[in-house]
Image: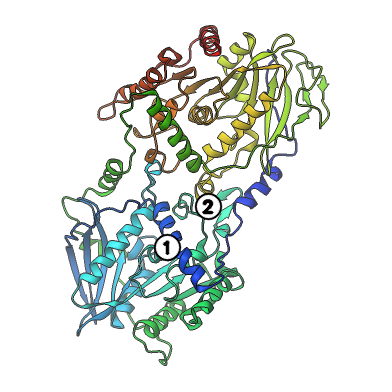
Amino acid sequence: MSKVEPFQVFPNGAAERLQAYYERMTEPLPLRARSKADWLERRPVVREQVIAALGLSPQPDRLPLDVRTGGTLQRDGYRVERLYWQTWPQVWASGWLYLPDEIQGKIPAVLNPHGHWQDGARHPVVQSRLISLARLGYLALAVDSEHLYDYPTGVTPLTVMTYNNLRALDYLVSRADVDRDRLGVVGESGGAQQAMYLMAVDDRVRVAVLAILVSHFQRILFNEGHHCPCNHIPGIMRFTDEPELCAIPSPRALQFLTVTGDWTASFPEHELEELRALYQLWGQPDRLDHRQFDSPHDFGQEMREAAYTWLERELRGNRKSEPVEEPAHVVEEPESLLTLDAPPVEHRGAEGILDWFRKRVIAQPPQLESKPSRRAYQERVRGEFRALLGDAAPVTLDTRWHSVENEERETKRVEDGASASAPHQAAHFPYLVSFRSERDVRVPAVWLPGEGAGPWPALIALHPEGKSAALRFPVVQGLHSQGYAVLAPDVRLRGELSRDWLHNAILWGRPEAGMAVTDVLACVQWLYGREDVDVRSLTLLGEGDQGVVALLAAGLDERVTATIADCCETTYRDGGEGLPIIPNVLRSADVPQIASLVAPRPLWLYRVPEDRVGFPSRRYYDWTNRSYQSLGDRDALKMAKTPLPDPYSLHEWLHRRIRRAKR
């Protein structure tokens, strides 16, 4: 086998080739309601989809609030209380309650989720809003933000913060001094994001101010990066966009505050017009308000005063009142407010939340013994993973061959548009090829023919570092020397197709593993179009995190004859470090069940994890073993905790198992 150096199929870079795909995936989804009846039919559908995307389906049980308090500060005209309320078992959300000194009867209450300020709700800008609301006669509650991620179970920061805010509303309506028909919410930046999702899933808030946030999702995505990860709700761009999220509570009173110095600058010309059209359908255009300020991303006094004025008009009904000025006030030193902290001693924090989700939403492997039940299970899980990975359009290959240099620096070239078989190839000589995987995407790959005229057994080799690293992998080199033809692609987002799209892909509902599986299946399609390949001897090898990609591709396409997959010494249930991020994967299956989708075809799993306390990982893989037993060929499954053996032993095993499978 020739010495392999990094191969570049697209000399001018792949950026331009991926740009069209990026633009298609980030294209805004306009809010289009043809009639009020049309919107009333769509709204509950979107709401259910939002609840599922947030990871709140099923919703946790509404436990007793078990409200606890910490310290209190008495100030001129108001007081501050540190507050805790129960959300999950032995888990309390925390917040800051600002109350007027004198409360007569029931008063309006305003929830105040906050953005990414240093010190959170203790930041002077947030304090100014809370103090002013209390001095204006509102009960104001600021909820502390919580940034928690557990993608395998579908938990993101908005999962936790939305539920904390729902429970905060439960607390507010439980108070004897709060008018439950006059609830408002004011949020800025990340706080407005929380308010947007809260109102999308709950109808109790009557008036909202959403500051410096709302735009089409497109404006917070970048081809070479991403906005704050907490903005990226799994799969939400598959069915909706931010204007429609904001429209769910219509025709409730909504005020949008934007600025010229951030991504909301274009809101008046685009998103606002979509929302205005809907409020016109409701016949209540005056319940939608917008103000734009010539400032950077901030929530300064002038903007806060616009919010107070809107609340006064819509919560108190003072529609003819003058603009409300912010009362004079003095904020506390952020550190001094920490003296009020007194969290419940039973509080389990993030651990308690994750424990609840892992007990409630993880799909438990069913007890299946018969062959028909195993087959039915495979088909069901395949369907679930097609949804988790994001369906792609059918493959249209459009093969192209590219120039490459051998060791002696002699340039060889097969002209673009040549047939897929590329005649007159020399054995062991690497060829560069690309083919279309899905619209706008071309997969670059290295093709190493086998010895002689063929047909050859074929190996698709996947490596976390791309095609050049795959060709340097000793097992790949060894199998090539044993007569295998090798196809080493750069699947997304690896090698030439490398991009920092992790969080964007989560938002699209097209995780990296989903894009990679589509590219692998295009490789399978390409090999099936070649006369010099024995397609009944097609093996797929995945090293590192590409092991799960290989298992998914083989599980979804039975044309793959045999699979060799790295288990990375873990499972998603056991932490998943080193495995590709697939949001909600544990709601369908873990790696052992994904592996069982390959049964009864030959499968070699390596670096299978050892037993760990509380996570019997190897015993968990017994489920995979039983699948092979039920489907008729347990010897077709090989599991080892060690890395791959020498290529000769692997070749002998593959040859023996594939020959048996052909019978």
- Name which residue lies at 21% across and 63% down: 340
Nearer-the-camera pick, 583 or 321: 583
Q: From the viewer's perspective, is 172 left or right of 320?
A: left
Quadrant of the rendered image containing residue 373: top left
- Name which residue lies at 56% across and 23% down: 560
Q: Quadrant of the N terminus?
A: top right
Of tags 2 and 1, which is closer to the observer?
Answer: 1
> What amino acid is labelled 1 in the image?
Pro
Q: From the viewer's perspective, is 661 left or right of 529?
A: left
Give the residue furthest to the front: 372
Q: In the rendered structure, which disc, 2 or 1, sits on the residue that comes first in sequence?
A: 1
Colour scheme of the picture: rainbow
The answer to whether 381 is drawn above or below residue 475 in the figure is below
The answer to whether 240 is drawn above or below residue 531 in the figure is below
Crowd band around label 1 with a 10 angstrom C-alpha radius: few (<14), some (14–19), many (20+) = some
Q: Position of residue 270 (x, y in %)?
A: 60, 69
Q: Position of residue 459 (x, y in %)?
A: 61, 19
Quadrant of the rendered image containing residue 492: top right
Q: Position of residue 313 (x, y in %)?
A: 39, 85
Q: From the viewer's perspective, is 367 left or right of 17?
A: left
SS for callout 2: helix
* Label ID, residue 238: 2
- Name which residue lies at 30% across and 59% down: 164
> What amino acid is labelled 2 in the image?
Arg
The answer to whether 296 is drawn above or below residue 554 in the figure is below
Crowd band around label 2 with a 10 angstrom C-alpha radius: few (<14), some (14–19), many (20+) = some
SS for callout 1: helix
* Label ID, residue 44: 1
